[in-house]
Amino acid sequence: MTYADHRELREELSKAAGSKAFKGDALDNQQNVLDIAKLRYNRAQLLGYKTHAHFVLEERMAETPEKVETFLNELLEKAKPAAENEFKTLQRFAKDLDGIDTLQKWDSAYYSEKLKQKLFSLDDEQLKPYFKLENVIAGAFMVAEKLFNLHFEEISNIDKYHEEVLTYKVTNDTGDFISLFYADFFPRKGKRNGAWMTSYKSQSIQNAQNERPHVSIVCNFTKPTKTKPSLLTFNEVTTLFHEFGHALHGMLANTTYPSLSRYQCVLGFCRIA
């Protein structure tokens, strides 16, 4: 969507992605979504709440739907003028460059990249050779060592769910075992898109024994070939460090109850599980 020069192809891809599970066939999810919403509402009503939002927000930072709406409206008031100006600039750019009269959603990423190159001479593709995956991993481990005195040793003597998954033993300066760390970086058939952190075993204290966690991060970076390594964009580097930061949260947990140490980040939605 960012680099395809053929507008018709971008439109086809956008519409295909936007209509997944929405085609009235055996894989259609419309009724499932309605059923889930109804069940959530019924549960909230049974528990004495006005809506599902009132139920789930009670124990979260926002506390109430009203606070969420106030925050979003204040954000809209402050952000919308700037967004409209940026959109008008992008519209003029697309018109001047390719005669596009009406900018569609499948055009935004493409012309935003072109405009960025024009204004700042910045091309993510030119940065990628500096971000070889192995170097970025080493950089993340170096940061963890400097900040938290953690050391990562790649090991191959534990079970893993796929041969491409990397596994590491994590220790501290005195050699104490801190965590097992799993890293699953490349796309494959059947694997979900996106990036997330999760844990297979949470830290807890049981029978006076500190049970250490098994933590994982999952991404979908470009897979290396025989002649070319996996090279990341700057945004992908940010994604790796983002998920690794959540992984550190899990690795360094030191609580009595697993419910307080089980941290998850799924597609950007991060929470204590």
Image (cartoon, helix red, strand yellow):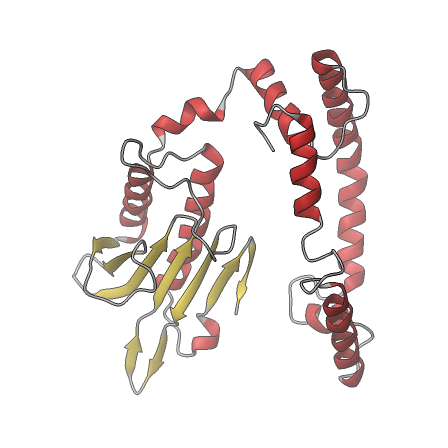
Residue furthest toward the front? 25
Q: Residue at x 80, y 53 (%)?
A: 70
Q: Is residue 45 visible?
A: yes
When the figure is inspected, residue 241 is found, relative to residue 121, above or below; the finding is below
**Location of residue 32 in the rendering, given as x and y in whole percent from the top left corner:** 72, 69
Locate the N terminus and report the quarter of the image it occupies.
top right
The location of residue 222, given as percent across then percent down, is 41, 40
Nearest to the observer: residue 103 or residue 271: 103
Q: Is 241 placed above or below 10 here?
A: below
Task: Say left or right for 179 vs 45.
Answer: left
- What residue appears at the point 45 percent right and 69 percent down from the top-left corner? 262
Q: Is residue 19 above or below residue 174?
A: above
* Quarter assignment of residue 87: top right
In the image, residue 79 lies at what x, y percent? 75, 36
> Relative to residue 43, is residue 253 drawn left or right?
left
Residue drawn at x 16%, y 61% is: 174
Left/right placement of residue 74 relative to residue 113 reads right
Which of these two is toward me, 177 or 243?
A: 243
Viewer-proximal residue among 117 and 242: 117
On screen, residue 153 versus residue 166, left or right, reads left
Going 34% across and 80% down the picture, which residue do you hit?
205
Place residue 168 in its image quadrant: bottom left
